Amino acid sequence: MSEKDFATLVENAKRICMTSDEREQQRRSFVWGNANIENSAVTRSVVNEVADGMARSGAYEKSSSR
């Protein structure tokens, strides 16, 4: 990939506005990817259960779209 193509992709990415659901899915994917490196017992299902439980308890609020 040329430097110009890369720069074009970066500029296009700057204009993407994710919905709150897309941001939440990205957040959970990030958490899973990092936690799973340290502990292979951490699954996507575990991350979802914890995030959902925290949201229900009020300890965690899903991000709003920007």
Image (cartoon, rainbow, N blue to C red):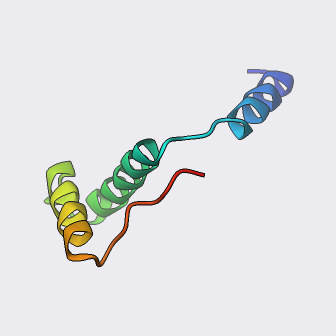
Q: Identify the residue shown where x is 44% and y is 42%.
A: 22
- Percent across and percent down for residue 52 are 21, 61
- Work out whether 54 lies above or below 51: below
Residue closer to the observer: 41 or 32: 32
For the N terminus, the quadrant is: top right
- Percent across and percent down for residue 57 are 20, 76
Q: Identify the residue shown where x is 72% and y is 36%.
A: 15
- Percent across and percent down for residue 6 are 76, 28
Q: Is residue 40 visible?
A: no
Residue closer to the observer: 15 or 3: 15
Q: Is residue 7 visible?
A: yes
Q: Identify the residue shown where x is 39% and y is 51%.
A: 24
Q: Quadrant of residue 38?
A: bottom left
- Percent across and percent down for residue 8 are 80, 26
Left or right side of 36 for 2: right
Left or right side of 32 for 7: right
- Work out whether 24 lies above or below 53: above
